Image (tube, rainbow, N blue to C red):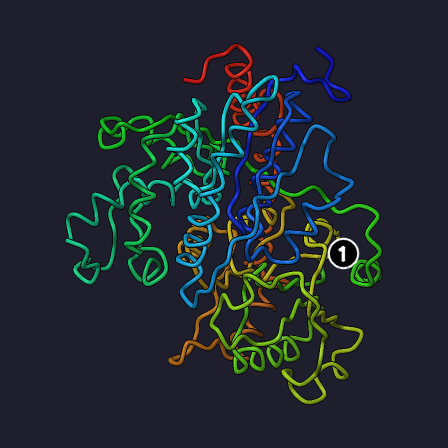
Amino acid sequence: MAVDGKDTQKPHVAVLSSPGMGHVTPLLELAKRLVVDLGFQVSFLAITTDAPPAQLQLLNNNPTLPSDLHVIHLPHVDMSSNDSIAIRILQIVRESLRLLPSVLTNLNSHKPPPKALIVDPFCAEALETASDHSIPTYLFLTASASFLALTIYFPTLHAEVKGDYGKIKERVFLPGCMPLWVDDLLPDVLVPEVLPLCNRFPLVKGIFVNTWEELEPVPLCAFKNHPFFVNLPMPTVHPIGPLTKDKEVDVESELLTWLDKQPCDSVVYLSFGSGGTLSAEQMVELAHGLELSGKRFLWVARPPGADGASGSFFEVGGDVSLTASYLPDGFLERTRGAGLVTATWAPQVAVLSHPSVCGFVTHCGWNSVMESVVHGVEMVAWPLYAEQKMNARALVEMGVAVRPEAGEEGVVGRAEVERVVRLVVEGEEGKEMRGRVRKMQQSAVEALGGGGSSGGCLSRLGKEWRDGSTG
């Protein structure tokens, strides 16, 4: 069977993503792998309601998408919500999935019909619809294996404390895994509204995780061997990562031109993800700290958020002009040459892979963590929301990140910013972190290779789909 060009007899897989770049990006990378590496055709089902501009730009008329990857937009639904991001996404998905039966009916009429439907956790309500259409369903968790362990354990934990998470004493002890600190999980992670999703996990045929054996051996081993997980009606876990965006090519960017002029391993890159924003006070302290450090920096400095740390989640990629109004007086002039500030967007993979970049101040979203490790860049862990505090602690314990200490009001002061920036660029601890993260980088390359753990895992599953087995 030919792999090049369109072939209606190529095995067919459907992928369903909830809105938001943190969900769409890794699912799209998986879809591209299925097409390019395994010779599948993929129908990528995208929810358009409240989709940020960056998502639409990624999926619409993108010349880098392979010809056998077909994007299908689910129609817009009317929504109005002032709830948290997680609850708002759940509401959007629930309304959008009312339109899924007709979409799957149409896909089933194609030759061949889908061998599988792959969904992210927010779309778990699609499982029943897929079952009605005799399509086996797989879950792709766009977070860590440790987070998957917590998610699977969550119904048990919820029952033990009867929904009162204040009863948990300092740490959550996951079976066979490292304990998690409850301060890292409240108020964003232990949310009772996600229980219906957690309870659906055993209904899927398998769970994909964007990680690899060498990065998270403890939870991955627990899934296979610990009695708690073994005795559950739990699907097989498939570590297939790291799945990250390809390096942006042919990007005309003043940011990259500026980086080309900087010495090797001299620049700290700061970005707080597709939806992260800082308070006005924190923006000022961060700017002063960068200036005090005297080090080179590239900063994606979105305007301060009035709606909390995740305030720009649904607006990322929109037009924003850089103004000095939310930065200290004279900051841009005083740091001109040593620093570069943008308010909207940076080609993050191209930046992290640039030889002048030696550190990444990151919100610790899992996609950004994967990109940093894949390109061998140590991190300053600055979590904002969701499971990012949990990720930040893990990165510090792995020895590939340093975490600044906030003051009593939750603001990281300028002196602390100066300390961690200097540590990353010139400190001995920074050099040690760089060595560790570059060892992880090598293990990531090996995992994705033909004989690697992740590459082999995805290939075996692709063969099962081709042969008609969906176990």
Q: Position of residue 15 (x, y in %)?
A: 54, 34
Instruction: Give the residue at x 51% y 28%.
Output: 105
Q: Is residue 177 left or right of residue 375?
A: left
> The residue under label 1 is which amino acid type?
Cys
Which residue appears farthest toward the bottom when viewing the image? Answer: 329
Depicted 1 relative to depicted 122: above or below = above
Q: Position of residue 11 (x, y in %)?
A: 60, 18
Q: Nearer the viewer, residue 348 or 309?
A: 309
Q: Nearer the viewer, residue 175 or 16?
A: 16
Q: Nearer the viewer, residue 271 or 397?
A: 271
Instruction: Give the residue at x 15% y 48%.
Output: 160
Q: Is residue 388 left or right of residue 195?
A: right
Instruction: Give the residue at x 46% y 49%.
Output: 93
Instruction: For the C terminus, give its image quadrant.
Output: top left
Depicted 310 relative to depicted 21: above or below = below
The residue carrying mark 1 is 264
Q: Dot 1: few (<14), some (14–19), or many (≥20) neighbours within 10 Å?
A: few
Depicted 364 relative to depicted 118: above or below = below
Instruction: Give the residue at x 21% y 50%.
Output: 158
For the image, the number of numbered tags is 1
Choose top left, top right, bottom left or bottom right for residue 258: bottom right
Secondary structure type for disc 1: loop
Q: Nearer the viewer, residue 186 or 316?
A: 316
Instruction: For the N terminus, give its image quadrant.
Output: top right
Choose top left, top right, bottom left or bottom right for residue 165: bottom left
Choose top left, top right, bottom left or bottom right for residue 441: top right
Q: Position of residue 142 (x, y in %)?
A: 49, 43
